[in-house]
């Protein structure tokens, strides 16, 4: 057994795990954070994506011991007392996800992208999401959702941060 200590969603957490334990298993089974999904277990689907030290990582491919001393953000760490993260809010309000299985991975990949590229082009978003498989949506609403969330994050006065998505806001009366 190895003791792995890491900062998860702003909180210092430790667990004693077998050395072959993946970060995904540690998060789900030892820390009870089940937002990252177990999909393929070989790094193809992206359902397990979390952010480690600012980078999107497939948690099924990283050993928990490799995350020792690092900072990990999971989907559970995005929302605040004030409400959902703009990505979560937009994806929920616009139907960018259908069944939702891929959602946590797509949102975490998108967050990592927006943290480094606040105004991504549609092509940059497509490139970032190439490691996230979705069998339901065809990705168009996801790409539009990431662009909308990016605009919200750049503009703190946005209606979305006040509780309404610009895409869903009523048109102005003349």
Image (cartoon, rainbow, N blue to C red):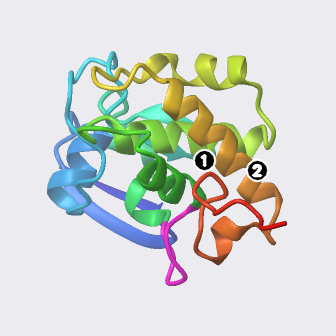
State the extent of the magenta-drawn residues as a range: 79-85
Q: Main secondary structure of the magenta part?
A: loop
Residue sitting farthest toward the bottom: 81
Q: Is residue 139 above or below residue 114?
A: above
Front in this rendered view, residue 35 or 25: 35
Q: Is residue 88 above or below residue 38?
A: below
The image's mark for residue 53 is 1
Kind of element beneath mark 1: loop
Q: Earlier in the sequence, mark 2 or mark 1?
A: 1
> Which quarter of the figure has residue 22?
top left
- Which residue bears the numbered disc 2? 151
Kind of element beneath mark 2: helix
Front in this rendered view, residue 83 or 26: 83
Q: What separation in Å lies between label 2 and label 1 (alpha carbons)?
A: 24 Å
- Residue placed at 40% from the left, 38% from the top? 105
Q: Position of residue 117 (x, y in %)?
A: 78, 37
Q: Tally the numbered discs.
A: 2
- Residue placed at 44% from the left, 71% from the top? 12
Residue sitting farthest toward the front: 174
Q: Position of residue 47 (x, y in %)?
A: 32, 33
Q: Position of residue 157 (x, y in %)?
A: 81, 72
Q: Position of residue 113 (x, y in %)?
A: 66, 37
Which of the two discs, 2 and 1, sits closer to the camera? 2
The image's mark for residue 105 is none
63 inside magenta stretch: no
84 inside magenta stretch: yes
């Amino acid at each position: 057994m190895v003791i792995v200590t890491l900062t998860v969603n702003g909180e210092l957490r430790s667990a004693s795990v077998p050395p072959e334990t993946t970060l995904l298993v540690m998060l789900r089974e030892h820390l009870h954070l089940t937002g990252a999904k177990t999909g393929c277990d070989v790094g193809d689907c992206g359902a397990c994506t979390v952010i480690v030290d600012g980078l999107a990582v497939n948690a099924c491919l990283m050993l928990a011991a490799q995350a020792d001393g690092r900072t990990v953000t999971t989907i559970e760490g995005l929302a605040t007392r004030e409400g959902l993260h703009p990505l979560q809010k937009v994806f929920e309000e616009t139907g960018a996800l259908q069944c939702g299985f891929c959602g946590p991975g797509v949102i975490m990949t998108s967050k990592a992208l927006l943290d480094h590229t606040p105004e991504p082009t549609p092509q940059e978003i497509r490139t970032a999401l190439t490691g996230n498989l979705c069998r339901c949506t065809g990705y168009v609403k996801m790409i539009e959702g990431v662009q909308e969330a990016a605009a919200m994050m750049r503009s703190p006065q946005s209606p979305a941060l006040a509780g309404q998505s610009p895409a869903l806001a009523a048109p102005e009366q003349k």
